[in-house]
Amino acid sequence: MRYLCATLAALLVASGAAVSKPAANGFVLTPGVSPAAAMAEMSMQARAAKLRKAWLAAGNANVPVTAPVLRGGSILTPTVDVTRPPSAPAVVIRYKASAAGLAAVELDWNSPTTDQWMTSTYYVPPGRPAMTHGDLIIQAPSSIGAGSEFASNGAGTFGPYAAPGVWTLWQISIVDRDGGNVGYGPTSLEQLFPVTNITVKNRRMPDVTPPSVISGRVLTPSVSLSSPTPSFGVELKVADDLSGAQNAFVTVESNTNGKTLQQKNPTSAPIRRGEMTAYTSVAGGPTGEWTILGFGVYDAAGNLFQDANPADIQALFGTTTFTVTN
């Protein structure tokens, strides 16, 4: 049985709403954003937490951090051709960081007609003097420190399967060396950038079809917080005849306090047909019953199959809940 994606369904839907502006000490995950955007927020939040821990371990004072600020920006490449290296959009941003200096900037691009995503991340090289303000040009892979956090379309570049047509700069996330961080969504970016769209040209063989999920099963109906890896996991049998399935996720929520978690599970190589697993850590609990909110699979082109329909989840896994114990 093929489980069809419920378009515009519940928590896992792409939204035009701006990412909630966070307090200076962390991101506020926004209900209604797509899985890719949620993953981007979570990855930046995790990076910020690690940077904050390292900052304090280095003997710096434990004082409240100030969130960085995006003052404006511009897209320098209105058209990107996947056949012409670096096949990557170039963006200049004007920023203000804390005295600790900038640590990383993440750009998330979306093809609204296919829901493909492409993410590139600029990392400030270790040892560089604090970058506290100014203009920064980001274009992978030529930018110093540029890399990929969610490489569905290559390391910050549009790969051979990228969908042709309009792509939108959907989100920019910024984190400082002391852990201060902030995210700007579509509405905010439209006010800060003259234009937030680019045109991608692809005369090769674009892949615009999401993967199929053929069957699935729960691997951990009960999760113990005392285990070395307290994670809820599922196995999905998938099919994707062109670029291949490459990243799966499962989203879960505690019925006790509403805590919602999701994480990416990239494979070492694309899978045309076979099984892939998706795990989400529930470390820290709470104990009790949890609900499977949704699941999804990306292919190597960035096309997304997602389903947040409780009836589909029940049919696929035979349950919509699992248990977390001590």
Image: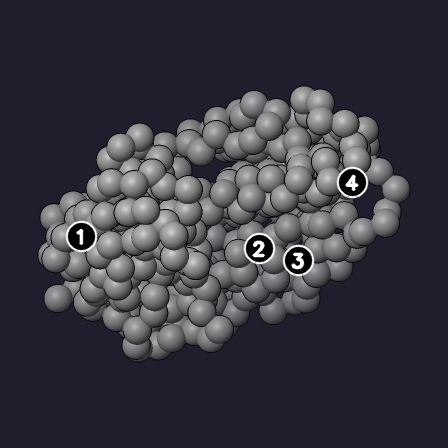
Pick whichever of labels 4 and 3 is earlier in the sequence. Answer: 4
User: Type of residue at label 1?
Assistant: Ile
Whether 243 is drawn above or below 134: the answer is: below
Using the numbered discs, state the Cα–Cα distance from disc 3 to disc 1 in whole angstroms.
35 Å
Disc 3 and disc 2 in contact, CB within 8 angstroms: yes
Disc 1 and disc 4 in contact, CB within 8 angstroms: no
Residue 24 position by quadrant:
top right
Residue 280 falls left or right of residue 57: left
Secondary structure at numbered mark 4: loop
Using the numbered discs, state the Cα–Cα distance from disc 3 to disc 2 in whole angstroms.
7 Å
Q: Which residue is mark 4?
A: 58
Residue shown at the point (22%, 56%) measured from the top left = 221
Pick whichever of labels 1 and 4 is earlier in the sequence. Answer: 4
- Foreground disc of the pair 3, 1: 1
Q: Which residue is mark 3?
A: 147
Residue 195 position by quadrant:
top right
Q: Which residue is mark 2?
A: 149
Whether 321 is drawn above or below 244: the answer is: above
Q: Which residue is mark 1?
A: 313
Whether 148 is drawn above or below 159: the answer is: above
